[in-house]
Image (cartoon, rainbow, N blue to C red):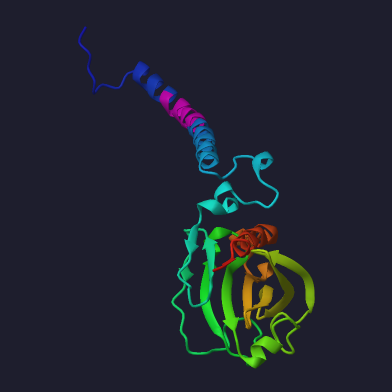
Amino acid sequence: MKIEWNRVTWYSKTLALALFVTLPFAGFFLGVRYGTMAESAAGAFFAGAGNPASSDAVPTDGLIAYYRNTAEWQTDANNTAGGFSIAYPIDFPAQDNYSLVPSTDWRVGADGATGTLYFTLTVPKAFEPQTNFSDARLTVGTGGSADALAGCLRPDATGGPSAGPTSTATVDGIPFVVFRSSDAGAGNYYDTTSYRTIRGGTCYAIEYTVHSAQIYNYPASYGLKPFSAAKIDALMENVVGTFRFQ
């Protein structure tokens, strides 16, 4: 039988109608199946990369294994002049190109006392994506002037961690006084934790400031969530815990 492909018949119309009706449903079904499979694959991938696939596997501080295991971190031991070493996650930018010119930025709220800022570590916004986290900054500075030593273990008169010593802690076997404070301005919040001690006639300050933004300043369409302060604090405390005197 000779088939005339360009001829419209009753069965060609029926076949076309059937395809017109069934193809959208088939496409929708396959799309749903693909999305489910892709989501499962993504969950398995991130679980394997250290990002838990379910809340049951998330540590209480929210940190994945790498940020908890300080033995795997990069160690900065080039500060022979500062007399210390410190470790940090290799994926965070660090700066140890210090200047020997005295300045007041060696610690928060130095109130005019000069010193040297030896080390700076920055935790970028991408560490807590889709949240109101802005960044976090950890510094190590020292001051040997009379003013720096006088204000080392007492609350700052103006600015900085002025809430008074809230606790003491031991870092590398040395007791530190721990000051905490909060500041705000123009919809931004700054929470600072300052570890200070005097060793060899020098004030050492290990400090970190967590910077976040007022979440209600962003449109709801951004879909931002509040950042995990416990997660950031746990990370920064882990960094502080790697500090060692040389």
Vertical placement of residue 48 versus 125, above or below: above
| Residue closer to the observer: 128 or 83 | 83
| 141 within the magenta span | no
Percent x, y for residue 34?
Answer: 48, 33
In the image, 140 versus 130, the foreground residue is 140
> Among all residues in the image, which is located at the extreme left?
2
> Most extreme residue toward the top, as rendered?
1
Residue 245: x percent and y percent? 58, 69
Location of the N terminus by quadrant is: top left
Of the 4 image quadrants, the one containing the C terminus is bottom right
Frontmost residue, 155 versus 80:
80
Q: Which residues are magenta?
A: 19-30
Quadrant assignment, res 235 = bottom right
Query: Is residue 20 toward the left or the right of residue 160 in the image?
Result: left
Q: Determine the image quadrant of residue 108.
A: bottom right
Question: What secondary structure do most residues of the magenta stretch adopt?
Answer: helix
Give coordinates of residue 198: x percent, y percent: 67, 79
Between 11 and 129, the residue placed more toward the observer is 129
Residue 111 seen in the current view: no
Name the residue located 67 percent from the left edge and 64 percent from the top edge.
173
Could you tell me which residue is drawn at 65 percent across and 44 percent down? 58
The residue that appears at 63% across and 73% down in the rendered structure is 207
Give how far across and how far down residue 206 sits, in percent: 62, 73
Residue at left offset 23%, top offset 23%: 6
Quarter of image, res 106: bottom right
Residue 21 shown in magenta: yes
State whether residue 154 is above or below residue 246. Answer: below
Numbered circles on residues, count: 0
Q: Is residue 161 visible?
A: yes
